[in-house]
Amino acid sequence: MSQIIIEKADITKIGTECIVNAANSGLHEGGGVCGVIFKAAGAYELGMACKALGRCNTGEAVITPAFKLNARYIIHAVGPIYRDGQHNEAELLYSAYYHALSLAMEYSCHSIGFPLLSAGIYGYPKKEAFKTAIRACQDFIRHNSYEIVIKFAVIDDEIYGIGIKTLKEMEENDESYSK
């Protein structure tokens, strides 16, 4: 049965078949979640794999091996930089999640670990970021007959609380969401 879970956990230790990197469009090693993932996976190996891919547009995702991580793959999803909510930010963020989930399915991964994309240095308001993320995940589950466990890994108590509350509200308000 497919499900969405929010855990207070380190993304590199979430225990899923693939994890999602909050990537930049150049697929370069960055700070925050991206830097942690590069370090845990092996910065040189992951950097070379990303260099071979070149770029990834905002709202899209690409995949590499997970190297030293306890996962099969790293999916690099590029969320938008938040300006004011009037520059297609929600659509691009939704698309980044949906593309990542589609890649997980294409590569036969039945579990995926996400950070909260765009909510760090890209400045996306956390509650709105969770709403968009959860909506994309719910839509993916609803539109695909594919069983997948979707975990959000957060390390901050406040963000964890926002995520749990938002997920509960959205599941209660979505009568068609029954998986």
Image (spheres, rainbow, N blue to C red):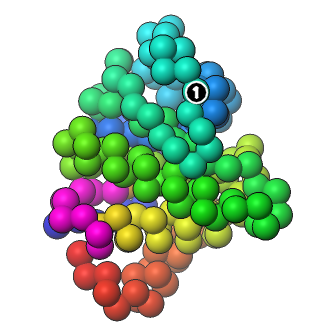
x then y, percent, for residue 68: 35, 18
Q: Quadrant of residue 178?
A: bottom left
Write the residue at 38% across / 25% down. Answer: 64
x then y, percent, for residue 127: 64, 69
- Provide the residue designation for mark 1: 55
Write the residue at 33% across / 38% down. Answer: 18
Asked if one can make out residue 109 in the rendered structure from this viewpoint, the answer is yes
Q: Quadrant of residue 62?
A: top left
Q: Quadrant of residue 27?
A: top right
Write the residue at 69% across / 60% down. Answer: 89
**Magenta stretch contains residue 39:** no
Left or right side of 1 for 69:
right
Asked if one can make out residue 152 in the rendered structure from this viewpoint, the answer is no
Q: Dividing the image into 4 quarters, which one contains the C terminus?
A: bottom left
**Range of magenta residues:** 142-150
**Magenta stretch contains residue 146:** yes
Local secondary structure at mark 1: loop
Q: Amino acid at mark 1?
A: Arg
Nearer to me, 136 or 39: 136
- Crowd band around label 1 with a 10 angstrom C-alpha radius: few (<14), some (14–19), many (20+): some
